[in-house]
Image (cartoon, rainbow, N blue to C red):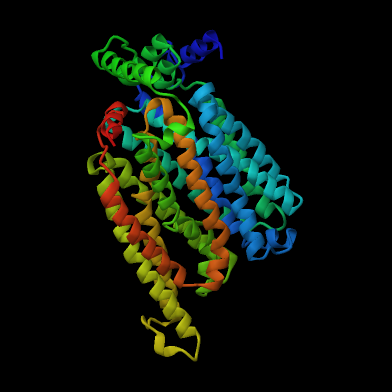
Amino acid sequence: MSRGLRCGLLNTTFAQPGADGLGMRYARPKYVVTGVTALGGLLFGYDIGIMSSILQMEGFNKYFDSPDALATGVIVSSLTIGCFLGSLLSGPLADRFSRKITIMLGALVCTLGSAIQFASISRAMLIAGRFVNGLAIGFLSSVVPMYQSETAPPGSRGRMVSLQQWAITWGIFLAFGIDYGCSYIEGARQFRLPLGIQIVPSSILLFTMAFMPFSPRWLVAHDHIGDARQVLGRLRAYGHTSAPEVTEELRLIHRTIAFEHATKASSYWELLKRPNRRRTLLGCGIQFMQQFTGINTLMLYSPTIFRSIGMGSVQSIAMFQAINGLVNVTSTVPAILWIDRWGRRATLLLGTLLIIVFYLVLSLLLRSYDALTDLTSHDSVIFNLGPHGLGIASICMVYLVVASFAFSWGPCGWLIPSEIFPTHLRARANSVTTGTNWISNFVVTLTSPVLLQIAGWRLFLAFSIIMAVNMALIYLFLPETKNMTLEEVDTLFAGS
């Protein structure tokens, strides 16, 4: 991209305080920038949530000949394979063309994938559309948290990146709510409408992102110091580019990046060398562990769980799923408000402990339900609440697991990898850590419908054991990074 075009886009948004249509002079710029880019999170969440109730719809099953458990796993997990590939491609693209342009590319590809899904006339076309959407979500899920982390001030970086997770939960909630509304429609429109609506937010993201600034750290890394000062001035001091905090942050960024350019290579191999090896293991480990909380089993396949405990109608299942999405949205709010006060470690440890307890209770409730509805095995009933009582209690446990995840592993899973790597490796590192998330997601989403059929309640007992291991690993190996600049976090890990 030429300097003239780059500066033109910058000046469109940040020419003079108050001169632009976004109200940068009077609004807090960090919230405007974070809010616009969080549309990428909304698309991410919408794509995750939209298929869960669609798979139960009569119109969908009639049109696509009632996919079995394996076919269902393929349809759902085709998104995650695209996400995995997209996340790996995002690193080089974000380094070369900028974080901003990569986000815009993700929005464009998402629009294309949504159109393919909307027009699907076969399973293969539907899977292809979800794969294309997956490429887009791979771009967005990797680059958006990194962009937010690089543009946010140190004292509120956790809050800014947590807004991305909140947008994901809103996307899931909207998907569940739209599915519920469309469940009353007859025929193919019942599933086509929710699939096609994705085009609206992706188009809005593509348009509004054109008015957002480039990452100041990306600008410094490409020797555009003057532009970086202008962006920092707008983000930190309402246009006062000579403000002391702007000068000091620019000096620190420039010194760190100059040192990295002089002494360190920028390649994937660097992620496996000291002192980056620990960061890589930690970033990939956090993303891997986030998926093996089992959250996507609950978000994608909870309709299967609801049906197994006596909730029979499509409308009632869609309603319970919509409530599930609302729990996810509201429970993310504490992280937005207090994660920079609580810290990353304490938030993850508390959330993990609660998930362990609620999974254990859920597994026992489901075991009791199975025993109570099997007339030959009443001796193994642990909670004798009656079938209806056990069903309601199980649904409540699902909601409590989701709530515990939403304020802990949800935001921290994206925040920590986005802040622990040095600037010259951050894009490539985030592509690898996000790729780990998506390949883990693929395993979970592909196997969950089969495991729910075979193992039933034992699957949630296994998740509680996995979470106990996760808790020990977090306690032993995760350092605290709250209220540090990205350059200070770099120093923290430099001697690892």
Q: Measured along the vertical axis of the image, is residue 387 above or below residue 48?
A: below
Image position, residue 192 (x, y; %):
68, 49
Can residue 37 be seen in the rendering of this structure?
no
Report the quarter where the N terminus lies.
Answer: top right
Image position, residue 316 (x, y; %):
53, 66
Residue drawn at the location 51% of the way across and 11% of the way down: 8
Quadrant in the picture for residue 279: top left
Residue drawn at the location 26% of the way across and 12% of the way down: 243
Q: Residue furthest front?
A: 273
Camera-side residue: 466 or 338? 466
Judge left or right: residue 189 versus residue 101. right
Image position, residue 369 (x, y; %):
45, 79
Residue drawn at the location 40% of the way across and 18% of the way down: 261
Q: Residue furthest bottom?
A: 376
Total marks drawn? Answer: 0
Camera-side residue: 197 or 488? 488
Judge left or right: residue 211 versus residue 469. right
Image position, residue 141 (x, y; %):
49, 39
Quadrant in the picture for residue 467: bottom left
Report the quarter where the C terminus lies.
Answer: top left
Can residue 276 be seen in the rendering of this structure?
yes
